[in-house]
């Protein structure tokens, strides 16, 4: 029997998808543009990082090969060894959208067969009936925001008014999301979650992917910061996922970070949710070590997206990639013969791109483990090839529409 660990580097895309133009993302390349900026000395930050992108471990596994296969261009400043140690390639998304649920569900063998609902109006984004229902259900004095916004910018702008009036800050983006920001003490964390639960029900008929609670703390004098108590209220995946299959066969599963939320807690096994990429990675490695034969660990590292991609912070994003790379040997040291590790991403979020939204990109795929020989797995026509490969590896039968490599 074998074990598997799947790591999603949230938003670490590797080049515009063929249909990127229809998302306004033609030419986007999260990884490539970060590497270019680093190689050009444009991603230096005192006390944080300097110079070319340093990813020796990912490069050894074939990251530069995967990126180049996707874009046709070398990954600037990142080594491309003659014989990479990992299986390397890139995935193409078949689902519509460029958000976390579509990406993760497709990775898990469940592409999205329907069109998401969106709040497309930049101002007064939410229909008046929905706003009225939220006010009624949440016993609110009103709402603030009601537009497209960056989550940190809108908190900076409206937090004081929120505290004064008790009205939560509601906003959206190009994704199928309704986000609600509120102060943990002034509004109350549980009250925010309850408002999100009720709003979830209200937006079900609109096919909105996620209602996201965005709690924050702080004072007007010192500023406001979002906390690790973010919570996503997603609709459940529309078809069977690898998690469902594993549960049906009695396998041990551990999910780390926001995986539980993304799959609406359906067959997500033991859920662990520490805060921050480093803590999540450590927890996942420890959980993987405990897994019995046949088990599966599924980890999402969200900081790339939330802290750096949406914030258009190139040095921050580069430093986060370098930090992940430096942690990777800790996982490799725990892999036993029969174990499979896969690293991939769910969409892009090019920090050099206009606006603050995700970008429609290919994703890198690296697979490795003791005894797994390196080599190209090429272009994968669906992220679902990952679930198919894991399903085959773990011996739970053909899984989803993908093809195992
Ligand atoms: O700007 P923040 O609040 O981080 O919001 C972002 O987070 C959502 C989920 O990734 C995206 O749709 C985008 O709106
Ligand atoms: Mn994501
Ligand atoms: Mn995001």
Image: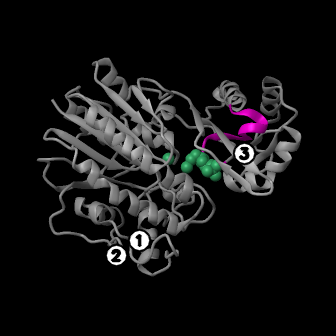
Horizontal side, residue 111 vs residue 156: left or right: left
Q: Residue at x 29, y 40 (%)?
A: 5
Query: Does residue 186 belong to the magenta stretch?
Result: yes
Q: Earlier in the sequence, mark 2 or mark 3?
A: 2
| Cβ–Cβ under 8 Å for marks 2 and 3 | no
> Does 109 sit above or below residue 149?
above
Asked if residue 379 shows in the view, the reply is no
Query: Does residue 151 belong to the magenta stretch?
Result: no
Secondary structure at badge 2 equals loop
Mark 3 is surrounded, within 10 Å at the Cα level, by few (under 14), some (14 to 19) or many (20 or more) other residues, namely: many
In the rendered image, residue 59, in percent from the top left (x then y), is placed at 27, 64
What residue is shown with label 3?
A: 171
Instruction: Give the camera-side residue of 231 and 149.
Output: 231
In the rendered image, residue 246, in percent from the top left (x then y), is placed at 31, 24
What residue is shown with label 1?
A: 35
Q: Earlier in the sequence, mark 1 or mark 3?
A: 1
What residue is shown with label 2?
A: 77
In the rendered image, residue 8, in percent from the top left (x then y), is placed at 39, 46
Image quarter of the N terminus: top left
| Cβ–Cβ under 8 Å for marks 1 and 2 | yes
């Amino acid at each position: 029997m074998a074990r598997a660990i799947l790591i999603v580097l949230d938003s670490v895309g590797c080049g515009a998808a063929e249909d990127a133009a229809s998302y306004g993302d033609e030419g986007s390349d999260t990884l490539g543009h970060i590497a270019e900026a680093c190689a050009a000395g444009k991603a230096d930050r005192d006390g944080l990082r300097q110079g070319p992108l340093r990813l020796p471990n990912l490069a050894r596994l074939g990251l530069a090969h995967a990126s180049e296969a996707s874009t046709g261009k070398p990954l600037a400043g990142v080594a491309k060894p003659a014989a990479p140690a990992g299986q390397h390639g890139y995935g193409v998304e078949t689902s519509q959208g460029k958000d976390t649920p579509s990406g993760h569900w497709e990775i898990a063998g469940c592409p999205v067969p329907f069109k998401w609902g969106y709040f497309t109006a930049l101002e007064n984004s939410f229909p008046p009936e929905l706003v009225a229902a939220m006010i009624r259900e949440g016993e609110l004095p009103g709402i603030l925001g009601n537009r497209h916004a960056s989550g940190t910018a809108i908190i900076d702008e409206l937090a004081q008014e929120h505290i004064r009036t008790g009205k939560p800050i509601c906003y959206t983006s190009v994704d199928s999301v309704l986000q609600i920001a509120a102060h943990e003490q002034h509004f109350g964390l549980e009250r925010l979650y309850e408002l999100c639960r009720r709003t979830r029900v209200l937006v079900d008929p609109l096919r909105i992917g996620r209602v996201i609670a965005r709690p924050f703390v702080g004072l007007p004098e010192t500023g406001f910061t979002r906390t690790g108590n973010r919570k996503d209220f997603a609709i459940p995946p529309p078809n069977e996922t690898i998690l469902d299959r594993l549960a049906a066969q009695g396998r041990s599963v551990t999910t780390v970070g926001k995986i539980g939320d993304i799959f609406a807690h359906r067959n997500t096994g033991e859920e662990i949710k520490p805060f921050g990429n480093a803590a999540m990675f450590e927890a996942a490695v420890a959980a993987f070590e405990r897994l019995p034969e046949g088990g599966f660990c599924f980890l999402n590292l969200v900081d790339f997206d939330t802290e750096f991609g949406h914030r258009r912070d190139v040095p921050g994003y580069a430093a986060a990639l370098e930090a992940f790379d430096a942690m990777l040997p800790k996982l490799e040291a725990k892999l036993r013969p029969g174990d499979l590790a896969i690293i991939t991403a769910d969409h892009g979020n090019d920090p050099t791109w206009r606006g603050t939204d995700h970008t429609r990109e290919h994703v890198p795929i690296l697979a490795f483990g003791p005894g797994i020989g390196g080599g190209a797995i090429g272009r994968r026509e669906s992220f679902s090839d990952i679930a198919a490969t894991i399903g085959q590896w773990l011996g739970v039968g053909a899984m989803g529409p993908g093809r195992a490599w």
